[in-house]
Amino acid sequence: MERLRKRRQRSFDYAKHRFKSDTVFLCSRFEEGIGTNPEELVGAAHAGCFSMKLAFNLQAAGFTATELKTDAEIVFEDGSIVASNLTLTAKVEGIEAAKFDELVKDAEANCPISKLLNTKISVQYTLN
């Protein structure tokens, strides 16, 4: 019964389309079960934004990625997000490791969500 009282529905507007997100449970921050929490939504936004910025960087440098898969781990301590740890798996033919590293670091620093977050950001990646 207590869990039901903590449940909140959230709606988001995006590109003139209205949709309902998964149910956001306030208690899902600390318990397993149905729903998500704000930190998971921030992680999803950061992973997606980073991947888009990296794809843009690669294309501008003359490369095409056949795979960019980014996962984000948001570290939440004492009521604050203290880190966003990104893990990337990438397949990009013909790119040298140093050039890829340069483009990853630029995406890490310059994707809009990275700029928004006032926290430590790290990226670990596997190329090809």
Image (cartoon, grey):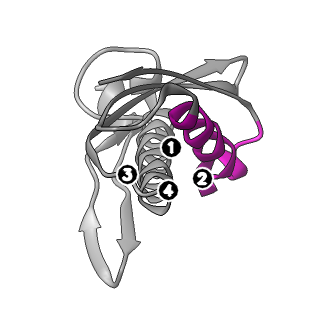
Indicate the amino acid at tag 3. Answer: Phe
**Nearer the observer, 63 or 107:** 63
Marking on residue 61 = 4
Q: For the residue marked with disc 1, what is the amino acid? A: His
Q: Which residues are magenta?
A: 99-118
What is the distance, in whole Å, between disc 1 and disc 2 at their CAs? 8 Å
Quadrant housing the C terminus: top left
Q: Give the CA separation, mark 4 to mark 1.
A: 22 Å
Whole-percent x and y of residue 118? 77, 40
Q: Residue at x 30, y 15 (%)?
A: 32
Q: Which residue is mark 3?
A: 63
Q: Residue at coordinates 37% horizontally, 73% vertically from top-left?
A: 14
Q: Mark 3 or mark 1: name the one nearer the start of the chain.
A: 1
The CA span between labels 3 and 4 is: 6 Å
**Quadrant of res 6:** top left
Tell whether 18 sits left or right of 63: left
Tell me if label 3 and label 4 are in contact, CB under 8 Å.
yes
Residue annotated with mark 1: 46
Name which residue lies at 50% across and 45% down: 50
Which secondary structure class fits the magenta region best? Answer: helix
Q: Which residue is mark 2?
A: 111
Dividing the picture into quarters, in which one does residue 89 lie?
top left
**Mark 4 or 2, closer to the camera:** 4
